[in-house]
Image (cartoon, grey):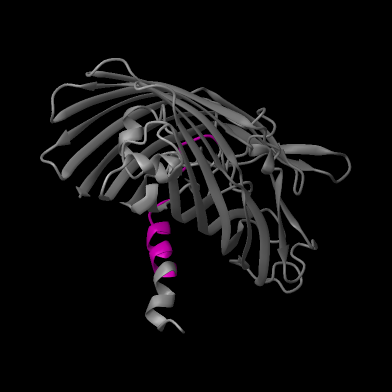
């Protein structure tokens, strides 16, 4: 049966609406780990083992078997980064005799862009030990923006990547101790990158845009070691995107800077998590997590224009990242039947191996998290969750050279991040 036009457009419309507000990465690389408000309060410690609410769809779908009845969850996270550059840039002149000269311009302002990350989850217990879940979230994103005339304008002005993931899932309780889960991901990605060009017309702005739908999956296992302790293992697959869009210029010079179609490959990396949850006594829970991300997938991005641009058939954006780890520990204190207080710390390792690989588009570095949160249960059906995290970002040196036109940017970034979040949970028998 053919779906009516409105039904066919619904997934695209939902994804586009979410992508419009979800674009600021605050995990390592360009990952967005903020997919749960209860998880944020613990710095996402125990993410694959806690299974406290329907957001377990993202962290470990096997945890759905711990949820009773039907649950709706709607959350929003406001991510407020600050990223400020200090330093300078030089332009190499290959004409004999070889020389270089400093580039003019300011420091770019605060490149950090406040982002809003929404997430929605639904779970329903079925017969025979099965549970169904549906999650809609934004697992990857990036947003930096500099003043158009800053000293590094030939390397980056705007960098904007947004994704939306629609993730139906099923979980099955194999035994009283063992649960397994599986999910499918339909992921929408949209990207926009811009920078100025020193030739053939100074400060001609080049903008690359593209979008794509692609598919992936996630798996999970939850094992109850004893009445107080459970172990969670989760895996989320890579997703291969082929972004299709355009390359455009503010000044069009036929055969040199034409407006043309383009496509580019982008792979979001696979992740694997190991989590532990332990109930110390009726009031205290403790949890821990280690998550590995295969950021070596981000080797480079080749943009293939429909016709040569600047005499090139391929425009290459640099990568060269390493795989990375994220470690976290946290605790819950159940003050009474209505209030739960949360806390956690985390160490988030950058995948960027050195200052010579770091670019102004993603000037990331190691991050140390401190998080707090609380949950209030107003009755048998409704919970309100809030969370806050501050991310301390290590001083970030940069010494990057672009081989296309010979610009080198040298200096450092000072950065930090604040995150505020809230969500509502409705549970029905």
Q: Position of residue 321 (x, y in %)?
A: 67, 36
Q: Position of residue 29 (x, y in %)?
A: 56, 38
Q: Is residue 200 or residue 235 the one in the foreground?
A: 235
* Residue at x 74% of width, y 64% of height: 309
Q: Is residue 287 or residue 222 the one in the foreground?
A: 222
Q: Position of residue 51 (x, y in %)?
A: 36, 36
* Residue at x 43% of width, y 62% of height: 15
Provide the residue span drawn in magenta: 12-28
Residue 39 covered by magenta stretch: no
Residue at the top extreme of this rendering: 280
Residue at the right extreme of this rendering: 96
Residue 24 covered by magenta stretch: yes
Q: Is residue 161 or residue 295 the one in the foreground?
A: 295
Q: Position of residue 154 (x, y in %)?
A: 63, 48
- The image quarter containing residue 335 is top left
Is residue 45 visible in the rendered image? The answer is yes
């Amino acid at each position: 049966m053919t779906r009516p036009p409105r039904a066919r457009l619904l997934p695209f419309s939902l994804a586009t609406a979410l992508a419009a507000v979800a674009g600021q990465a605050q995990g390592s690389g360009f990952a967005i780990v903020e997919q749960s408000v209860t998880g944020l309060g613990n710095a996402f410690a125990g993410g694959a083992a806690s299974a406290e609410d329907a957001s377990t769809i993202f962290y470990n779908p096997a945890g759905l078997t711990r949820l009773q009845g039907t649950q709706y969850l709607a959350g929003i996270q406001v991510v407020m980064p600050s990223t400020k550059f200090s330093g300078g840039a030089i332009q190499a002149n290959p004409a004999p005799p070889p020389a270089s000269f400093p580039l003019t311009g300011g420091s770019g302002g605060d490149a950090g862009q406040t982002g809003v990350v929404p997430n929605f989850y639904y779970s329903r217990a079925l017969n025979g030990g099965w549970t169904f879940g549906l999650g809609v979230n934004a697992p990857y994103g990036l947003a930096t923006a500099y003043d158009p005339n800053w000293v590094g304008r030939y390397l980056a002005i705007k960098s904007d990547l947004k994704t939306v993931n629609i993730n139906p899932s099923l979980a099955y309780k194999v035994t009283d101790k063992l649960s397994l889960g599986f999910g499918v991901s339909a992921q929408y990605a949209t990207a926009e990158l811009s920078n100025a060009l020193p030739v053939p017309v100074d400060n001609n702005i080049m903008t690359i845009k593209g979008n794509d739908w692609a598919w992936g999956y996630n798996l999970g296992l939850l094992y109850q070691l004893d009445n107080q302790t459970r172990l969670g293992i989760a895996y989320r697959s890579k997703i291969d995107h082929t972004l299709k869009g355009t390359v455009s210029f503010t000044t069009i010079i036929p055969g040199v800077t034409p407006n043309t179609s383009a496509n580019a490959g982008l792979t979001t990396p696979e992740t694997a998590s190991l989590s532990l949850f332990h109930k110390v006594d009726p009031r205290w829970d403790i949890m821990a997590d280690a998550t590995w991300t295969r950021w070596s997938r981000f080797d480079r991005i080749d943009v293939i224009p429909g016709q040569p641009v600047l005499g090139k058939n391929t425009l290459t954006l640099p990568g060269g990242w390493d795989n990375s780890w994220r470690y976290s520990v946290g605790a819950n204190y159940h003050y009474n039947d209505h209030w739960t207080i949360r806390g956690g710390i985390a160490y988030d390792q950058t995948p960027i191996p050195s200052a010579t690989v770091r670019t102004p588009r993603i000037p990331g570095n190691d991050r140390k998290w401190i998080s707090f949160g609380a949950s209030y249960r107003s009755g048998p059906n409704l919970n309100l969750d809030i969370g806050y995290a501050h991310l301390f970002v290590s001083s970030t040196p940069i010494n990057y050279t672009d081989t296309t036109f010979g610009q080198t940017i040298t200096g450092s970034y000072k950065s930090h991040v604040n995150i505020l979040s809230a969500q509502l949970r409705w549970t029905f028998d």
